[in-house]
Image (tube, rainbow, N blue to C red):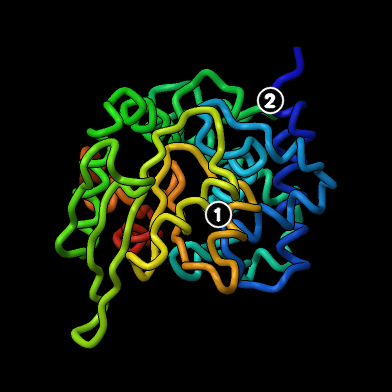
Amino acid sequence: MASRREQAGLPLYPELRRVTLGTMRQIALPASRSEVYEHVADALNLSEDQRAVPCANGSMPEYMDRVGWALSFLKQARAVDNVTRGSWSLTDEGRSIEFNEVERRVSAARAEYHRNRGGQGEAASDEDPGDSSEETESDWVDELLNRLHAISPTGFERLAKELLLKAGFDEVEVTRASRDGGIDGVGTYRPSGLISFRTSFQCKRWRDAPVRAPEVQAFQGAIQGQSDRGIIITTSYFTKDAEGQASRPGALPVDLISGNRLAELLKEHELGVRTEMVEQVTVDSSYFDQFEDSQ
């Protein structure tokens, strides 16, 4: 049976990193993560069916997951970086660095990672990390999404309420079950002391299916006349058509929070996710050169 990578028409990681770097050298920068995803998919001539192949945890398409890893490795190689939250650009080195040097840096970073974890310092394989059985930096996201799938739908709605309160919303309420008409809760967001936005939210604790344009359109219809804008929060992901519908001119604007973005928000606001900073100490040998006895 074909792997998810093969079903999605994707090359192995080294080639994907090369295509991602080459694509970023051709597009307007800075670019959002989703823009990089789409440009790389276009460069690989992926069909709509290939772009719809979900990754293992169902939180996003396989090609997005793998291009996201390619970006992470290119960042380790100091070829790309985040210029602002959620947007990417080339570094000065990244504009001209030879790809062989990129791969050398990736291998060195992976070897250091394994050494720190008590491994043997092996280099990254062509299939690392997506098809590796070893623990990777995305494990916590998979674990978190699996935990969210285990809670009840009403529990997920209460979690959404806690998240919105932490994010600065006021007067957040979860609507009564079975009487929400597609609206799971409402709140008020005040970005300043001058204006406020009545906001309705909808929760979709989905695992394998993406949220599509018809679901977004139905939600827009449900909140018409009741709210200024909406939010859909899912443990899955949104299709490209859904993203277009959410910002379609003439329709109520709807912000979309995918599973991966939800994980980052829960981490940012420390809701069920703890971040431990590990101190790393290195010795600067050159400093001690001045104390060597001259001959």
Number of numbered markers? 2
Q: Residue at x 56, y 73 (%)?
A: 250
| Residue 150 position in % (x across, y down) | 31, 23
Residues packed near mark 2 inside 10 Å, few (<14), some (14 to 19) or many (20 plus) = some
| Residue 288 position in % (x across, y down) | 32, 57
Amino acid at circle 1: Lys
Q: Which of the numbered marks, if any, corresponds to residue 59? A: none
**Residue 79 visible somewhere in the drawing:** no
Q: Which of the numbered marks, if any, corresponds to residue 75? A: 1
Quadrant (top left, top right, bottom left, bottom right) of the C terminus: bottom left
Question: Is the C-beta separation of discs 1 and 2 under 8 Å?
Answer: no
The vertical placement of 281 against 295, above or below, is above
Quadrant of the image occupied by residue 206: top left
Residue closest to the eye, 261 or 156: 156
Per the image, label 1 sits on a secondary structure element best described as helix
**Residue 29 visible somewhere in the drawing:** yes
Residue that carries the numbered disc 2 in the rendered image:
4
Q: Is residue 36 left or right of residue 238?
A: right
| Residue 294 position in % (x across, y down) | 37, 61
Amino acid at circle 2: Arg
Residue closest to the eye, 119 or 221: 221
